[in-house]
Image (spheres, rainbow, N blue to C red):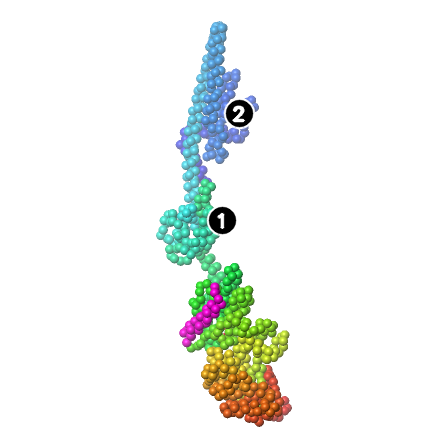
């Protein structure tokens, strides 16, 4: 880089005399700077001056100005402080003094010739000598002046050459700089204060995929016009802040408006560009970061999104909920969290396989997304659960309406997509800040509301706020929390209580599956405590489902030979009213290889309160499928006994409250009436709560076909129940030995 510059600094076309004078001056300069000039007198000479050297009267002109000083081409030192004009002025100032002295001397000689004519030769010789010296002095002065003029001319030439070579050197340096920029992958841009392109380095056209064009075509155009519309405003704001001096460096990622229309990301780093101490514009470096950006995006997308549906995942949702909380706090607004869960999704997997299940999840995600506003966040929480974060400006009724539209819309769309199955969803809703003030608690409340929605027969919406009034106190007890956890973890157990043939007490006709809960803290919890809890919490449906599945599992694996033995399971009214109860039951029974004929469904009489027509339709389907239908708790709370005969029940189970009174005359009459009425309706009779042989005998005497109670057996774990049945069925001798 330095070589061409030096070469250009050689002095061109100088005459020999000039060259030597320059060399002389340089030597003088170098000598002067090497060591000071010392005259014989031992005093340093002044840089410029005259010395009258007597007795020779030789006027010495000492031009001590080292002209070589003035040439930075020859030396990088700065020019000496004195110039030729100063030297000239000094010589003009000295000459009159000499002339005056010489004049005075000639006048003195003339006077002496007149006074002493005999010394005239001596005086004439002295006069000649002085005249000659004056002439020599003038000539010397003339030479000095000429030299000075030459020096001045030479200096101006030098200045010219220097300016030329400087601009040439600058141009060369610039060219070399641009060549270097061309080696970089980055693009260097210079923008005017108005944002127009003033300079572009080589790869600009490559960055814009404008292959056939030259950089010059772009000069003078607005830089921002090559930035994607979406990123333009931000970049413009940041660059004008930079020009105003509000920031020193701006680093920003944005997209360029490329001719091939591909999305290319650029990282731009900009700084102010100064000239003569003024802000002249902006200088920036643009780096194509598309690949790195896409990679980062892919990684962060993977970390924040669900692989199956492509929807945001829990991590993303958590962040957005926290953001929404911040925003709601500052703007005093509310937002809702909707927990959406597919009803009986397991069944879809079981019936159609996991691939179909996956496809359904994807469809649900798409349908939900399409029904929501862009500002609503939809995430897949996991499994068949989705969560919607719904900012809402108005009343809570608005959330109800949106949730209801989602539920109906989804059901209708899925009905069209899945013609051979019926897919519904349940929705639980919690509102910030009414129901909770932290993201975590809000999610828990929404989940509770969902749980309650499931328990209400699925395919419905529950708001956490409503839950408080519908299931009061369900939050309070620690037991509640432990119970909920037990249900969620499938920790409930099923015990079995046999129902005996009244005519043959050694033969159980069925075993009733009963839910039991053992808690580490509370031990065995009485069903009379946790069943109402389950009702209040809306868990009764879930409890019913778990009991059914466990019981079917046990029943299908039984190894006794009692072929006629039936499995009796309790079905709550809510379960029965759920639209998917029937198909789920059929599928579950089939899954465990059990025939509906082997199942007895015990249904409470309150089913009739749902409207006799509806109840009949629901029950008839079950009866037609082969299930035995038992009217449970008969005699309690049934508004119209006369309706019983309109429902397709196979048997009536007399409530324990009547059986316990059987030893009193009134109680006996009451039970006898129920038994007669049942028989009149061609229904079989079962009595529960038989606790002793006397009661058993009375009931048997009345014609009750089946008996159940502690007199025969308490509810037992499956193994104990299996032993019990095996013992009953063993020949009397073996049973006695056992
Ligand atoms: N196909 C498929 N199944 C999944 C996926 N993730 C979870 N599951 C299944 O989804 C089912 C979720 O069941 P639950 O929500 O507990 O129960 P459900 O059958 O939907 O019943 P309710 O929610 O009580 O109505 C489980 O059987 C999981 O194995 C998945 O990514 N794909």
The rendered magenta stretch, by its main secondary structure, is classed as helix
Q: Is residue 162 above or below residue 481?
A: above
- Residue 280 drawn above or below residue 449: above
Q: Residues within 10 Å of mark 1 (few under 14, many from 20)?
A: some
Name the residue: 51% across, 17% down. Answer: 56
Residue bearing mark 2: 45
Secondary structure at badge 2 equals loop
Query: Residue 732: image x %, image y %?
Result: 61, 93
Q: Please state which of the two labelled residues, at mark 2 or mark 1, is closer to the viewer.
A: 1
The answer to whether any part of residue 396 appears in the image is yes
**Magenta range:** 392-419
Q: Is residue 602 visible?
A: no
Q: Which residue is mark 1?
A: 247
Residue at x 50% of width, y 82% of height: 609
Depth check, front residue: 279 or 541: 541
Residue 600: percent from the left, percent from the top?
Answer: 52, 85
First in sequence: mark 2 vs mark 1: 2
Q: Is the residue marked 1 within 8 Å of ligand 1, measured from its CB?
A: no
Q: Secondary structure at mark 1?
A: loop
Q: Nearer the viewer, residue 122 or 609?
A: 609
* Residue farthest toward the bottom in the current orientation of the protein: 701
Q: Which residue is found at the position 59% from the left and 90% from the top?
A: 666
Q: Position of residue 365 (x, y in %)?
A: 45, 69
Pinpoint residue 354: horizontal percent, then vertical percent: 47, 73
Which residue appears at 63% of the width and 77% of the height? 523
Quadrant position of the N terminus in the picture: top left
Which numbered marker is on residue 23? none
**Is residue 335 magenta-colored?**
no
């Amino acid at each position: 880089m330095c070589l061409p510059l030096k070469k250009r600094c050689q002095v061109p076309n100088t005459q020999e005399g000039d060259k030597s004078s320059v060399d002389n001056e340089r030597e003088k300069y170098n000598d002067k700077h090497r060591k000071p000039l010392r005259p014989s007198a031992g005093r340093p000479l002044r840089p410029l001056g005259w010395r009258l050297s007597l007795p020779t009267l030789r006027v010495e002109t000492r031009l001590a100005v080292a002209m070589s000083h003035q040439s930075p081409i020859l030396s990088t030192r700065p020019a000496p402080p004195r110039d030729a004009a100063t030297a000239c002025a000094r010589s003009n100032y000295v000459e009159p003094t000499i002339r005056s002295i010489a004049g005075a001397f000639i006048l003195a000689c003339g006077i002496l010739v007149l006074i002493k004519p005999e010394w005239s030769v001596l005086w004439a010789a002295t006069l000649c000598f002085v005249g000659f010296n004056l002439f020599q002095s003038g000539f010397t002065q003339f030479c000095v002046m000429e030299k000075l003029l030459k020096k001045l001319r030479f200096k101006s030439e030098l200045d010219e050459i220097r300016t030329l070579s400087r601009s040439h050197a600058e141009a060369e340096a610039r060219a070399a700089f641009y060549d270097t920029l061309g080696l970089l992958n980055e693009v260097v841009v210079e923008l005017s204060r108005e944002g127009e392109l003033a300079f572009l380095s080589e790869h600009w056209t490559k960055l814009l995929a404008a292959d056939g064009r030259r950089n010059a075509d772009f000069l003078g155009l607005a830089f921002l016009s090559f930035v994607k519309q979406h990123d333009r405003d931000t970049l413009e704001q940041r660059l004008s802040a930079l020009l105003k001096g509000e920031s020193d460096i701006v680093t920003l990622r944005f997209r360029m408006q490329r001719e091939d229309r591909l999305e290319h990301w650029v990282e731009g780093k900009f700084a102010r560009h100064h000239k003569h101490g003024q802000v002249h514009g902006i200088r920036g470096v643009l780096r194509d970061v598309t690949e790195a950006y896409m990679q980062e995006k892919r990684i962060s997308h993977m970390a924040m999104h669900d692989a199956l549906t492509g929807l945001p995942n829990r991590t993303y949702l958590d962040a957005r909920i926290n953001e929404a909380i911040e925003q709601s706090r500052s703007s005093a607004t509310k937002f809702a969290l909707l927990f959406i869960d597919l009803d009986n999704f397991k069944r879809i997997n079981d019936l159609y396989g996991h691939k179909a299940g996956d496809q359904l999840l994807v469809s649900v995600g798409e349908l939900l997304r399409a029904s929501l506003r862009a500002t609503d966040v939809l995430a897949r929480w996991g499994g068949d659960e989705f969560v919607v974060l719904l900012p809402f400006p108005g009343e809570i009724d608005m959330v109800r309406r949106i949730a209801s539209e989602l539920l109906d819309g989804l059901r209708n769309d899925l009905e069209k997509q899945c013609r051979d199955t019926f897919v519904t969803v349940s929705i639980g809703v919690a509102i910030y800040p009414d129901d909770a003030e932290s993201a975590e608690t809000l999610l828990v409340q929404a989940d509770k509301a969902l749980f309650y929605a499931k328990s209400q027969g699925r395919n419905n919406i529950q708001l956490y706020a409503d839950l408080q009034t519908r299931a009061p106190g369900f939050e309070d007890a620690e037991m509640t929390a432990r119970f909920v956890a037990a249900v969620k973890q499938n920790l409930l157990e099923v015990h079995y209580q046999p129902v005996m043939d009244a005519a043959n007490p050694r033969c159980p006709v069925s075993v009733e599956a009963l839910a039991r809960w053992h808690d580490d803290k509370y031990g065995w919890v009485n069903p009379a405590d946790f069943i109402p809890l389950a009702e209040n919490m809306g868990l009764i449906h879930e409890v019913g489902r778990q009991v059914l599945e466990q019981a079917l599992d046990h029943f299908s694996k039984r190894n006794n030979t009692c072929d006629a033995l039936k499995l009796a399971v309790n079905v709550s009214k809510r379960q029965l009213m759920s639209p998917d109860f029937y198909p789920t039951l059929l599928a579950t029974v089939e899954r465990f290889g059990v025939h509906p004929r082997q199942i007895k469904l015990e249904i409470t009489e309150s089913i009739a309160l749902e409207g006799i027509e509806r109840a009949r339709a629901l029950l008839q389907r079950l009866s037609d499928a082969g299930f035995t239908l038992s009217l449970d708790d008969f005699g309690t709370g049934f508004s119209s006994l006369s309706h019983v005969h309109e429902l397709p029940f196979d048997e009536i189970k007399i409530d324990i409250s009547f059986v316990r009174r059987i030893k009193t005359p009134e109680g006996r009459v009451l039970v006898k009436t129920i038994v007669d009425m049942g028989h009149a309706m061609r229904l079989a009779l079962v009595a529960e709560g038989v606790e002793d042989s006397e009661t058993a005998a009375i009931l048997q005497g009345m014609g009750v076909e089946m008996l159940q109670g502690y007199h025969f057996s308490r509810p037992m774990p499956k193994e104990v129940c299996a032993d019990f049945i095996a013992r009953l069925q063993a020949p009397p001798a073996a049973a006695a030995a056992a």
